[in-house]
Amino acid sequence: MSTEATTAAAEGQIDPDRLKLYSLLLFTKLDGAVTAGMVHLGDQLGIYTAMRAAGRPLSIGELATAAGLNARWVQEWAHNQAAGGLIVAETPEGEEERFSLTPEAVAVLADPDHPAFGMGMFHRFPQTMHAVEHVRESFRTGVGHDYDTHGPEGAVGIERSFEPWNRAFLLPVVLPALEGVVDKLTAGIEVADIGCGAGGAAILMAKAFPASRFHGYDISHFALARAEEKKLEAAVTNVSFHDPRDSPLATDHSVELITTFDCIHDMTHPQQMMASIREAIADDGTWLLVDIKALDTFAENVRKNPMASLMYGISVLSCMSSALSEPGGAGLGTLGLSENVARSMSTAAGFSRFRRMKVDHSVNAFYEVRP
């Protein structure tokens, strides 16, 4: 910064060049939000799916026909997506524009079986943005809102966010990395998946290990309803789903494996939940704790996590709001359960062993916790 600019800033004067840059910075945030809405539409309207199925660049007319949509609306949508670098626009000499997806874009936008599939958060984008309205009062009262305020589509969005990666890696990578767990599952044990959501992980494990008995717990009525639907679709009989307020977790140390996927930081009373897990788990049992990869301080998160601003914002609209949805909630929030915090809390709950696992995930950290 020049001496003149430094002096002007110190005196509260506006520097015209810095003003322009700040305005640009602000409106890039609005650009991201609006383009996220367009991604939601592309997913929900099947435009990405149509582009993937074509396997070649399509004109607007061809794309609109393939997706069963109006060409003028598809054209404006495609221009947004191409301008944002999400799809490829080509204009061969003497021909009309054509649009396509790169192989990487197909994986993220249009292939629900790929572990990098990213449409879950965009699926529930309208519900997340609607939370802006109902958290305004939370800033005054301090009390947030649970996940069911996001409605059934919120539960489906979470399901679509995590299940592609779980389907690819939970059975072949994560479970074998836990000491002795696969052998126990094969022989037959009691398993509890706390914060099971739509039940994807529990059902996946139940199908793989028919001798074991799986119990999923969640307080979201929408998620539990979806879990029951998926259970019927999968035709599995060794899994059941429960609202812990009606059917509490065992307290007799009878559960050999407990899993918590991305939920502890969302809970109003996570320390109490860890104590309940300790009461439920067998003395030689295993707790697989999966949670957001967070660091201890704001400065560290900003320096090392390029998505820090997104995560803090999602925390206000979703994670922290859930964690404060009861008076006196802990309010950990999206980046509130760092490794050190998780280790300290598990020790306070009566666990003696805590190990960070060597599982590569862009968002989550994996911990093996033992009594």
Image: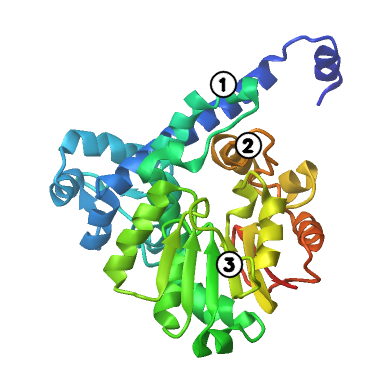
User: Which sits earlier in the primary sequence, circle 2 or circle 1?
Assistant: 1
User: Which sits earlier in the primary sequence, circle 2 or circle 3?
Assistant: 3
Q: Residues within 10 Å of mark 1 (few under 14, many from 20)?
A: few
- Mark 2 vs mark 1, CA separation in Å: 13 Å
Q: Which residue is mark 2?
A: 324
At label 3, the amino acid type is: Thr
Relative image position of residue 322 (x, y in whole percent): 57, 40
Q: Which residue is mark 1?
A: 137
At label 1, the amino acid type is: Glu
Q: Quadrant of residue 18?
A: top right
Q: Is residue 330 visible?
A: yes
* Quarter placement of the C terminus: bottom right
Q: Residues within 10 Å of mark 3 (few under 14, many from 20)?
A: many
* Quarter placement of the N terminus: top right
Residue at 52% x, 90% y is: 187
Residue at 17% x, 45% y is: 64
Locate residue 145 relative to residue 76 in the image: left or right.
right
